Amino acid sequence: MTINLFNQNTLELLFVAFLGIFIWRYLGVLYSKKIENESLVAKTINSIAYGMTTAIVCKIVFFPENALNLIPNKDRIIPFFIGIGVFLFFSKNTNLGLIAGIGGFSIFIIFRNYLI
């Protein structure tokens, strides 16, 4: 399937995605002052956001459908778990986890393309 910006289906998908994000953000701004940070509602919304982000990242890493599919599985999956391990080990520091994951991925790519 080829994605073309001027295709009617592509424009409809972009509009629906924009509408969903816009409504979600509008509701967040509208109710942000009324919801306490430690309430059940806030924790539920936070869990949904983390779950959606995790699902998207896992789909990209484990089931790629683009140029990332040309990279061997171990070169994608090992740095992914390195990043998660660093994130968890260093008291959930997202910056260190991200740097470790990107660094591991870069090392795998450089090693495979230039050193072997």
Image: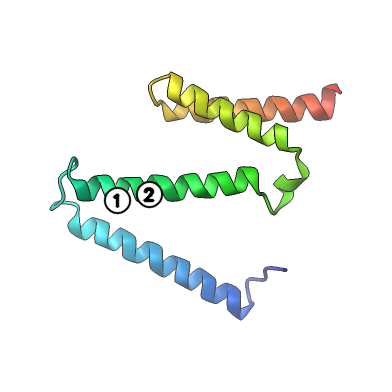
User: In the rendered structure, which amino acid carries the disc numbered 2?
Assistant: Ala
> Is residue 94 or residue 53 the one in the foreground?
53
Task: Please state, as top left, top right, bottom left or bottom right, where the C terminus lies in the image.
Answer: top right
From this view, report whether residue 78 is shown above or below residue 6. above
Which mark identifies residue 45?
Answer: 1
Residue at the spot 53% in from the left edge and 71% down from the top edge: 13
Residue under pointer 2: 49
Q: Is residue 29 visible to the viewer in this orientation of the structure?
A: yes
Task: Please state, as top left, top right, bottom left or bottom right, where the N terminus lies in the image.
Answer: bottom right
Check disc 2: other Cα within 10 Å, few if <14, some if 14-19, many if 20+.
few
Question: Which residue is most to the bottom?
Answer: 8
Q: CA–CA distance between discs 2 and 1?
A: 6 Å
> Is residue 9 or residue 85 the one in the foreground?
85
The answer to the question of whether label 2 and label 1 lie on touching residues, with beta carbons closer than 8 A, is yes
> Is residue 61 or residue 110 the one in the foreground?
61
Residue at the spot 68% in from the left edge and 29% down from the top edge: 106
Question: Which residue is most to the left?
Answer: 34
Q: Secondary structure at mark 2?
A: helix
Check disc 1: other Cα within 10 Å, few if <14, some if 14-19, many if 20+.
few
In the visual, does 12 lie left or right of 75?
left
In the visual, does 94 lie left or right of 80?
left
- Residue 81 location in percent, x, y? 57, 29
Residue at the spot 38% in from the left edge and 21% down from the top edge: 91
Q: Quadrant of residue 31?
A: bottom left
Q: Quadrant of residue 89?
A: top left
- Residue 51 location in percent, x, y? 42, 47
